[in-house]
Image: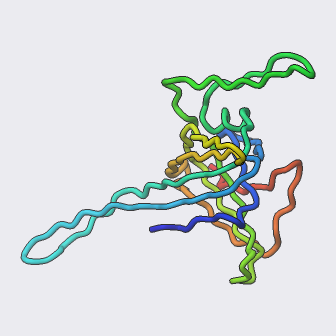
Amino acid sequence: MALGSTGYNLVHSQVAAKSDTPTFTDIPYATTAEFSVDQDNEYFRADGGVKVTAYGAREGSGSLGFGSADLQVISTLSGDTFSTSGTTPAIVDRLEVGSSTQPPSVILSIWVPNVDGNSDSAGLQITLPNAKVAMPSATYEQESWTEFEADLAFVSDENDVMMIMESLETAPTFTAGVIPVTLTSP
């Protein structure tokens, strides 16, 4: 079941490491977000017909696109090591991409405003409380903006919640570049 994708009207995406009190960080220049939930099934056939249909656990996948080389955000997404050295004007941000680094579980939240006017909602907030994001790939071209694309997978969290979709009557208030996220209490 495809849940849709967003492009030109995606205004905001943010990420937080999973913790009891997550702190969200803006993913600068979000461009795209795409999510899909799939569920396999098996049929038990007997006496010329299907007698039982067994459904497997749902699995989520998708991608996230953004246009900023914010190495600290990429580190939060991928689990790779970020460091800063030097002093102004010679500060160096560094991301060391390991060959065996496994992406950590993170919380992703996306705000998609209703620019099409197809409902009374101000927009949709989508939260993935247990996502893993692969190391983003990057495209560098002459006379072009750098674009990053990262595949992601998501499954249920400890509360058996894999995705939260909220249609908000009023757009959320941004504080220090992030919006509030309501998670299910464990």
Residue 146 versus residue 175 in the image, above or below: above
- Residue drawn where x is 55% and y is 43% of the image: 132
Q: Residue furthest top?
A: 86
Residue 139 versus residue 54 in the image, above or below: above
Q: Residue furthest left?
A: 47
- Residue drawn where x is 70% and y is 48% of the image: 144
**Of residues 10 and 170, the one drawn nearer to the viewer in this rendering:** 10
Residue 152 image offset from top left, x and y in percent = 53, 48
Judged left or right of residue 57, residue 66 is right
Number of dots carrying numbers: 0
Residue 58 versus residue 3 in the image, above or below: above
Image quarter of residue 127? bottom right
Q: Residue furthest right?
A: 88
- Residue drawn where x is 48% and y is 67% of the image: 2
Residue 36 image offset from top left, x and y in percent = 49, 61
Give the colouring mode of the picture. rainbow
Judged left or right of residue 72, residue 62 is left
Image quarter of residue 23? top right
Judged left or right of residue 29, residue 157 is left
The quadrant of the image that shows the N terminus is bottom left
Image quarter of residue 22? top right
Residue 11 versus residue 72 in the image, above or below: below
- Residue drawn where x is 67% and y is 39% of the image: 17
Residue 30 image offset from top left, x and y in percent = 71, 53
Residue 110 image offset from top left, x and y in percent = 69, 58
Judged left or right of residue 86, residue 99 is left
**Of residues 91 and 84, the one drawn nearer to the viewer in this rendering:** 91
